[in-house]
């Protein structure tokens, strides 16, 4: 009897560990930073909403927090915002997917200098290892997959130019030049992607100047799991949910 109880406890513990590895608990911790020498009345403070993670173990929790930290994802230092460089107003995040051992999260920053601006990044995490999932780890036949994403982008650009030219307000806008410059300086890649129940969305920033931001297309190219089946790496993280 005692042996049976021990076996039951072991099974419950194993199931608990497995379940916790399938998703993580994320709570928001808002921290308001006060600048010692604000350069305007609007720059006294900025707010950072940190995603605090509780995973299957403390060590994996720390790995995930490090992988999705604003400093890591945006390649910046928050300490610089306390000095002369005073752009940031708020940093926040949104959870897109958190199950099946996968965390898909987007982080964004909003601020202002000469004009308001924002930046957003997308990160996918393996919650079992705590590591970021790269395109190389998730997909196969990357060249063909990239061509498929580029084709979707080209279709979006063609449709955007057609729609914009119908508006008389855009008569003087150098639309063809804007998209040509974007093509040259903002190459499409597989690096920015997010996960949902439906499939994978690849994200592209056209990099339009602030004055033309309103003309910029969405830059989101969603493919269903069925469409992506030939490109999902066998045994990889995404193969768990691709169908």
Image (tube, grey):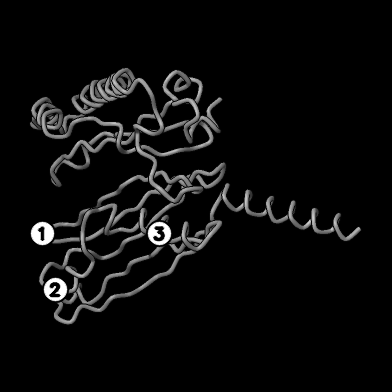
Mark toward the viewer: 1 or 3: 3
Mark nearer the N terminus (1 vs 3): 3
Proximity of marks 2 and 1: CB atoms separated by less than 8 Å:
no
Mark nearer the N terminus (2 vs 1): 2
Report, in whole angstroms, how far the alpha carbon at label 2 lies from the one at label 1. 17 Å
Which residue is nearer to you in this view: 56 or 23? Answer: 56
Q: Quadrant of residue 63?
A: bottom left
Q: Secondary structure at mark 2?
A: loop
Residue 189 percent location from the top left of the image:
26, 31
Report, in whole angstroms, how far the alpha carbon at label 2 lies from the one at label 3. 25 Å
Neighbourhood count class around disc 3 (C-alpha, 10 Å): few under 14, some 14–19, many 20 upward: many
Q: Residue drawn at (27%, 22%), measured in percent from left and top?
A: 150
Badge number at residue 2: none
For residue 119, above or below residue 65? above
- Name the residue carrying label 3: 65
**In-image side of 160 versus 125 (left or right):** left
Mark toward the viewer: 2 or 1: 2
Report, in whole angstroms, how far the alpha carbon at label 1 lies from the one at label 3. 32 Å
Residue 237 percent location from the top left of the image:
48, 36
Q: Secondary structure at mark 1?
A: loop
**In-image side of 216 versus 122 (left or right):** left
- Name the residue carrying label 1: 114
- Name the residue carrying label 2: 83
């Amino acid at each position: 009897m005692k042996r049976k109880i021990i076996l039951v406890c072991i099974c419950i513990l194993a199931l608990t560990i497995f379940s916790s590895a399938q998703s993580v608990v994320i709570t928001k911790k808002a921290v308001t930073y006060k600048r010692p020498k604000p350069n305007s009345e609007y720059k006294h403070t900025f707010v950072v909403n940190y995603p605090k993670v509780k995973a299957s173990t403390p060590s994996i929790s720390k790995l995930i927090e490090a992988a999705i930290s604003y400093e890591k994802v945006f390649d910046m230092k928050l300490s610089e915002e306390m000095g002369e460089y005073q752009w940031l107003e708020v940093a926040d995040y949104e959870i897109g997917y958190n199950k099946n051992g996968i965390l898909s999260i987007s982080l964004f920053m909003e601020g202002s200098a000469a004009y308001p601006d924002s930046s957003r990044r997308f990160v996918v995490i393996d919650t079992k290892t705590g590591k970021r999932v790269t395109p190389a780890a998730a997909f196969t036949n990357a060249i063909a997959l990239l061509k498929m994403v580029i084709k979707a982008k080209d279709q979006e650009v063609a449709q955007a130019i057609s729609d914009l030219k119908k508006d008389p307000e855009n008569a003087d806008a150098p639309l063809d030049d804007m998209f040509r410059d974007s093509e040259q300086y903002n190459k499409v890649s597989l690096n920015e992607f997010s996960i949902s129940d439906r499939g994978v969305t690849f994200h592209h920033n056209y990099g339009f100047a602030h004055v033309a931001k309103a003309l910029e297309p969405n830059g989101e190219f969603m493919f269903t799991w069925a469409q992506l089946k030939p490109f999902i790496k066998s045994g990889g993280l995404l193969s768990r949910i691709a169908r």
